[in-house]
Image (cartoon, grey):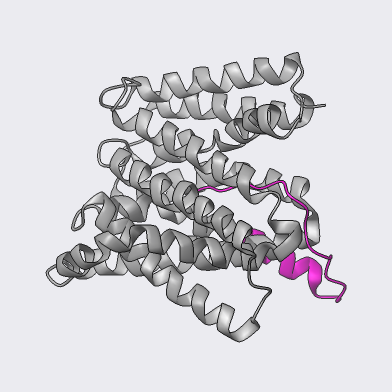
């Protein structure tokens, strides 16, 4: 799941080891989030999409709950609790249902490039709901990126026909953008780690109705499927958020976000190694278009 956030960051660490730790945090974040795409494909070999999501985030919620008990951050107000519930619904529940279902037919590498449109959706929603503004270069960059999505989808079953895998993954990116827009006003109040923990718990609760089915399927699943569920819950969902929070604190949100352009390339490479995925030319061309458009919007597209 490659996730970006341009909200206010925490205080920069001051120790002499901070630069090395920050670089390591970026590397762990990229690898963790990139690993989600091939391991979802592996997990889907033994679990249905919703059962995979439920098992994954039950694992992540256990880690989040342990952190909350240990650190005891400020509890959310009743109004903010509803906002965290919305974050869990859009950013975890619906996002993972759509992504997992889409990856049943779409290659993991292609999925990672499609999800990389998240910053564009976030910027567009912020334009309409948070009063931010796009200039003409921003709109042109967005159109170029979405054209890249069309190129990627042309090499996947069903293309961008509504209900096809690529369209579901594009809808997942939109849901994640809704989550980030909602979350933006929560992070300055509660901090990035607490926001991640509360969102993970909320997401796990939304997926709880499918947890019994997940446990039933896991009882007969292969070791590879069980390993995929644990890896998805521990690394992309839990550790990835924690290292991303540290990296944002050191580099600043905007600068740190630039590193995440590497995530689709790493996800594609991992998919080739882990799942034997064959890289399509349409994925390479469309992926480069998506990244170029997103980078251009970040550089010149907003005012």
Q: Main secondary structure of the magenta part?
A: loop
Question: Depth check: 104 or 206 in front?
Answer: 206
Q: Please report the residue visible at 50 percent of the width from the left and 35 percent of the height from the top.
A: 174
Task: Give the image location of residue 150, x and y in percent.
Answer: 43, 19
Question: Can residue 289 be seen at all in this image of the molecule?
Answer: yes
| Residue 201 in the image: above or below residue 38 | below
Q: Specify whether residue 236 is painted magenta.
A: no
Residue 71 x, y percent position in the rendering: 65, 82
Residue 119 position, x and y percent, is 62, 36
The answer to whether residue 255 is left or right of residue 242 is right
Q: Is residue 80 above or below residue 7?
A: below
Query: What is the quadrant of the C terminus in the image?
Result: top right
Q: Residue at x 39, y 63 (%)?
A: 205
Magenta-highlighted residues: 2-27
Q: Is residue 232 visible?
A: no
**Relative depth, front residue between 142 and 227:** 142
Picture coordinates of residue 278, whole percent (x, y): 31, 37
The front one of 206 and 234 is 206
Residue 148 sits above or below residue 99 on the image = above
Count the labels in the image. 0
Q: Determine the residue positioned at 61% across, 21% down.
A: 142
Q: Could you tell whether 99 is left or right of 242 in the image?
A: left
Which of the 4 image quadrants contains residue 20?
bottom right
Residue in the picture at 36% in, 33% down: 168
Q: Is residue 280 left or right of residue 235?
A: left
Residue 3 in the magenta stretch? The answer is yes
């Amino acid at each position: 799941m490659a996730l970006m956030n341009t909200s206010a960051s925490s205080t920069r660490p001051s120790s002499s080891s901070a630069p090395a730790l920050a670089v390591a945090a970026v590397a762990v974040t990229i690898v963790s989030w990139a690993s989600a795409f091939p391991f979802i494909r592996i997990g889907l070999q033994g679990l249905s999409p919703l059962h995979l999501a439920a098992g994954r985030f039950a694992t992540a919620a256990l880690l989040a709950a342990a952190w909350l008990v240990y650190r005891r951050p400020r509890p959310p107000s009743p109004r903010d609790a509803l906002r965290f519930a919305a974050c869990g619904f859009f950013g975890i529940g619906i996002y993972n249902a759509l992504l997992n279902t889409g990856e049943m037919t779409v290659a993991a590498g292609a999925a990672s490039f499609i999800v990389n449109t998240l910053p564009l959706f976030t910027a567009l929603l912020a334009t309409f709901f948070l009063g931010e503004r796009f200039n003409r270069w921003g709109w042109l960059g967005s159109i170029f990126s979405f054209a890249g999505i069309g190129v990627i989808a042309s090499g996947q079953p069903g293309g961008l026909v509504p209900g096809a895998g690529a369209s579901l993954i594009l809808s997942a990116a939109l849901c994640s953008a809704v989550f980030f827009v909602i979350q933006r006003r929560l992070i300055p109040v509660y901090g990035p780690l607490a926001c991640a923990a509360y969102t993970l718990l909320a997401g796990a609760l939304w997926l709880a109705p499918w947890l019994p089915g997940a446990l039933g399927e896991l009882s007969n699943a292969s070791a590879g499927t069980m390993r995929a569920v644990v890896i998805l819950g521990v690394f992309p969902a839990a550790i990835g958020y924690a290292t991303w929070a540290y990296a944002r604190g050191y580099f600043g949100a905007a600068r740190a976000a630039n590193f995440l352009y590497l995530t689709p390339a790493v996800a594609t490479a991992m998919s080739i190694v882990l799942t034997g995925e064959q890289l399509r030319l349409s994925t390479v061309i469309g992926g480069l278009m998506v990244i170029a458009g997103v980078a251009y919007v970040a550089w010149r597209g907003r005012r």
